[in-house]
Image (cartoon, grey):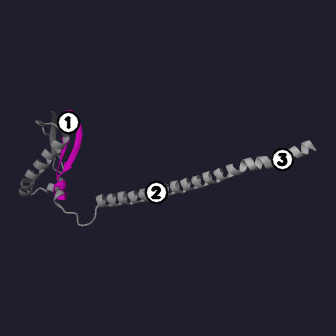
């Protein structure tokens, strides 16, 4: 287990957490900070403080800041996206890339099929040529033999 400290920032000053909590992961520390922010929200409003100005700076035992949780994230977590956000743009980009990759794959497969067809045709032509090659060699050899005999 690790020690996490939740320093409160009210928009102007920072209050240090001297006790901290022992937790297994930073994710658990985030959930603790989020829950504490939810619990503090009505108290801040009652004290006429703007919760949107507040945040928790979560640090480790060496006082290194692991993350900052602005209380505004509580509001953001409640909002439903009204328009496609960056996530859907990313999804669209991924889908477009997938379509281009599929098209490229189909083109490559088609190219391989054409090469196979060409190789088959070339093999067939070479086989036909092999039948005529001995006759051609005999034809060439015959006139040369006649010239040598004459």
Q: Nearer the viewer, mark 1 or mark 3?
A: 3
Foreground pick, 71 / 26: 26
Q: Secondary structure at mark 3?
A: helix
The magenta span reads 54-76
Which residue was labeled with disc 3?
Answer: 142
Residue 71 is inside the magenta segment: yes
Residue 100 is inside the magenta segment: no
Q: Position of residue 89 (x, y in %)?
A: 33, 61
Q: Earlier in the sequence, mark 2 or mark 1?
A: 1
Which residue was labeled with disc 1?
Answer: 60
Q: Position of residue 86 (x, y in %)?
A: 30, 59
Give the Cα separation between the discs numbered 1 and 3: 97 Å
Residue 87 as seen in the image, left or right of residue 52: right
Q: What is the number of the mark on residue 104?
A: 2
Q: Residues within 10 Å of mark 3 (few under 14, many from 20)?
A: few
Name, please, the residue furthest toward the right.
150
Q: Nearer the viewer, mark 3 or mark 2?
A: 3
Quarter of the figure with the N terminus = top left
Residue at 21% over, 35% down? 63
Foreground pick, 62 / 91: 91
Foreground pick, 42 / 115: 115
Q: Is residue 9 visible?
A: yes
Foreground pick, 147 / 79: 147
Q: Position of residue 114 (x, y in %)?
A: 54, 57
Quarter of the figure with the C terminus = top right
Q: Residues within 10 Å of mark 2 (few under 14, many from 20)?
A: few
Which quadrant of the structure image shows residue 8? top left
Q: Nearer the viewer, mark 2 or mark 1?
A: 2
Which quadrant of the structure image shows residue 47? bottom left
């Amino acid at each position: 287990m690790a020690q996490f400290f939740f320093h409160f920032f009210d928009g102007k000053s920072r209050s240090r957490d001297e006790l901290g909590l022992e937790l297994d992961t930073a994710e658990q520390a985030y959930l603790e900070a989020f829950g504490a922010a939810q619990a503090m929200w009505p108290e801040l409003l009652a004290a006429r403080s703007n919760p949107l100005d507040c945040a928790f700076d979560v640090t480790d035992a060496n006082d290194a800041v692991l993350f900052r949780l602005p209380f505004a994230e509580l509001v953001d977590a409640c909002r439903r996206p009204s328009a496609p956000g960056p996530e859907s743009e990313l999804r669209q980009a991924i889908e477009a890339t997938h379509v281009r990759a599929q098209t490229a794959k189909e083109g490559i497969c088609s190219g391989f099929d054409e090469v196979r067809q060409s190789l088959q045709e070339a093999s067939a032509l070479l086989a036909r040529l092999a039948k005529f090659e001995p006759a051609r060699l005999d034809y060439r050899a015959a006139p040369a033999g006649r010239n040598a005999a004459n």
